[in-house]
Amino acid sequence: MRLPFGTLLLLLTALPVQAQRASLADRVSALESQAATQTQGAGQANMELLNRTTQMQDEIRALRAIIEQLQNDLEQARQRNREQYIDMDSRVSALEGGGAKPVAAAPVPVKPAPAAKPAPAAAGENADYQAAYNSLIKQGDAVAAAGQFQSFLQSYPDSRLAPNAWYWLGESYYATASYELALKSFGILLERFSDSGKAPDALLKSAYCHLELKNTAQGKQQLERVIALYPEHPVADMARSRLRGLSLGQ
């Protein structure tokens, strides 16, 4: 059957439109596919970024835990060293204050010799020192101890216990955060009694005072001086530990 010319012309005219529609549909499908691919790729990239961020956060938490543990171990070591020093000083002070116990004299036919008694001045000196020491160490009253050590040094400036008294006076000030006064006390000890057994400790605590006063450069110099002057003394280990802490920003 032959189609009318008008119908045939209409069909021929409609063919390019259908072709255009098919082409547009193909392009839309391609764009949709590309968008889906890009979305999937972006989602995968975001997931990888999230995983990396989570991993880094876990690593940071682990490092912080290690640092906290190291700080705790360091503080415990410092406390043990301090307790050992306090115990040692207490024993030395007891020996210096009481002296050797008199040995009972052997009986003789007439009568035994009377036991020697310490001179009143020495007895008062030892008692005053021990009272101040007990206030600081046993009672933990740094304010009272500071006043007692000041009185002791005014009363007995040339006492054999003067170096120890200057050191513990500095410790009393340090315990009350009076770092300037503590620094002066430790400085007097180092100037007048440089050969004292308390000199290494006084130098170390002087460094600590500078650090507490934010004189970081001077504090580090003092710590290095402690290591140089007393390399085998326990204070050298404490100085090295503090320097390591400073290098880590602690």
Image: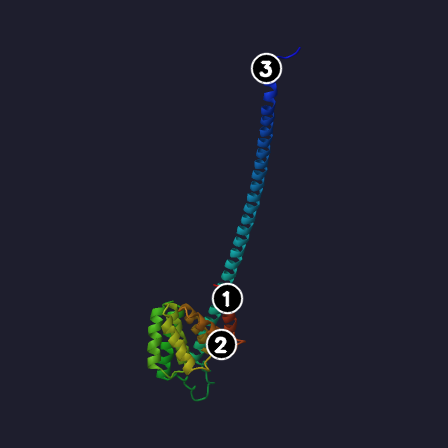
Q: Which residue is mark 1?
A: 247
Can residue 142 be seen from the camera position used here? yes
Q: Report helix, strand or loop for mark 1.
A: helix
Look at the picture and state if 50 lies above or below 155.
above
Can residue 88 be seen from the camera position used here? no
Residue count near mark 3 (Cα–Cα under 10 Å), binned few <14, some 14–19, many ≥20 = few
- Asked where in the image residue 139 lies, by quadrant, the reply is bottom left
Which residue occupies the foreground of this view, 38 or 196?
38
Disc tally is 3
Q: Earlier in the sequence, mark 2 or mark 1?
A: 2
Q: Give how far across and how far down residue 238 sits, in percent.
A: 50, 70
- The Cα atoms of the two marked residues, 3 and 2, are separated by 112 Å
Q: Earlier in the sequence, mark 3 or mark 2?
A: 3
Residue at the bottom extreme of this rendering: 110
Q: Which residue is mark 2?
A: 225
Identify the residue at image location x=52%, y=77%. Answer: 228
Which residue occupies the foreground of this view, 101 or 206?
206
Q: Give how far across and how far down residue 88 sits, in percent.
A: 47, 73
Say which amino acid is labelled 2: Arg
141 on left or right of 236:
left
Say which amino acid is labelled 3: Gly
Say which amino acid is labelled 1: Ser
Residue at the top extreme of this rendering: 1
59 on left or right of 147:
right
Labelled pair 3, 1 in contact (Cβ < 8 Å): no
Foreground tag (2 vs 1) = 1
Q: Give how far across and how far down residue 39 sits, in percent.
A: 56, 38
Identify the residue at image location x=49%, y=68%. Answer: 242
Which residue occupies the foreground of this view, 179 or 170?
179
Q: Which residue is mark 3?
A: 6
Residue at the right extreme of this rendering: 1
- Asked where in the image residue 27 lies, by quadrant, the reply is top right
